[in-house]
Amino acid sequence: MRRLRTLLSCLSVSALSAGLVGIGGGSALAAPHSPPSSVVSGFGRPLPAQVAAPYFETWTGESPAALAAASGNKYLTLAFLQTAAPGSCTAYWNGATDQPISRSTLGRDIAAIQARGGDVIPSFGGWSADTTGTELADSCTSVDAIAGVFRSLVTTYGISRIDLDVEGDSIDNAAGIDRRNKAIAQVQRWAQRTGRTVQFSYTLPTSTKGLEANGLAVLRNAVDNGARVDVVNLMTFDYYDGATHDMAADTRTAAEGLHAQLAALYPKKSSAKLWSMIGVIEMPGIDDYGPEETFTVQNAVSVEKWAEARRINTLSFWALQRDNGGCPGTGGSDSCSGIAQGTWAFSHVFERFTSRGHR
């Protein structure tokens, strides 16, 4: 698949592994109620029913806590976790073996974000992992081991949602899809037994009318395996169809198409409940396809108002490091939007979504 091409497509796993610096350790925020004695102090709290959580590029060595504070974001999606090589069942941040799932890696930053009343959503996959056999469920053939990795995120960092970015080769890997969903169901049973909150979101490619057939098959397999999908995030950019797009309007039609698809998958759920399962991911400015797919600050205002009216679950964008006007005219950069804008302009628009969700 072609979406989220800029996430990792220009960086090889070996390049990412070289020179990535772990951020110091720390403990996660204590729970608002007393957890079982076996649970670490970071017993996760549920995310808000409406949450803005931009992606953060963890391989840059920047501090997510510092950029979250500077940009006004309480919640971030941390990209990405993957294995170091195909066949492995050990996940690392960015596939770098010196960045394990550990409080010594990102722990201090995550704890700082949690202490300010926010949280992070660790994300597995992304274009690079999904096209190199290093996405966890593609790489690892043990459902128990995959579930163990998911549990380790919960107990290490005290988080309450895990995101699964499935695209590229991964979205057509039937065996990996089945293992991933079986592992989700296993973790959900574990969470129920231990009194934890653990949500799972799927991030999937989309057309302007909703999921493509292979994306829908991922969700059908989840239903078949008894795996609860809490949120479906649509990549509402990189349509690669040669057309010039109104990115805000196409976000709405893509989500409407997904709503209809979810209604067929979950016929007992109300329309409002289905909308509360939907998230959208934008790419600020000029995306990697080109100026035909440019998401403006005005588009962001329109999408935020629509998202609030529909009461969808998640607003996100790729990526926080792009949220500045430092490279006018440049498309697909990971460090700037390519349009004239104020620094953190997209963050400031989308943060209203979380605030309004607390009313």
Image: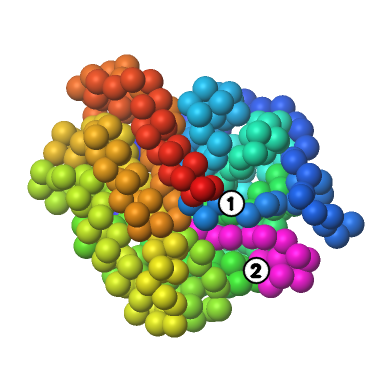
Range of residues picked out in magenta: 187-202
Q: Residues within 10 Å of mark 1 (few under 14, many from 20)?
A: some
Residue occupied by mark 2: 188
Q: How is the image coloured?
A: rainbow
Residue 179 visible? The answer is no
Horizontal relation, residue 225 to residue 12: left or right: right
Placement of 335 over or under 125, stated as above or below: above
Residue sitting at 65 percent across and 39 percent down?
117
Q: SS of the residue at dot 2?
A: helix
Q: Pick out the residue farthest to the left.
A: 243
Label number found at residue 47 = 1
Q: Pick out the residue farthest to the top.
A: 326
Placement of 299 over or under 239, stated as above or below: above
Residue 350 visible? The answer is yes
Quarter assignment of residue 136: bottom right
The spot of residue 243 in percent (x, y) is 10, 47
The spot of residue 245 in percent (x, y) is 14, 45
Residue sitting at 36 percent across and 27 percent down?
345
Horizontal relation, residue 284 to residue 141: left or right: left
Residue sitting at 44 percent across and 51 percent down?
314
Q: SS of the residue at dot 1?
A: loop
Question: Which amino acid is tagged 2?
Answer: Gln
Sequence-earlier tag: 2 or 1: 1
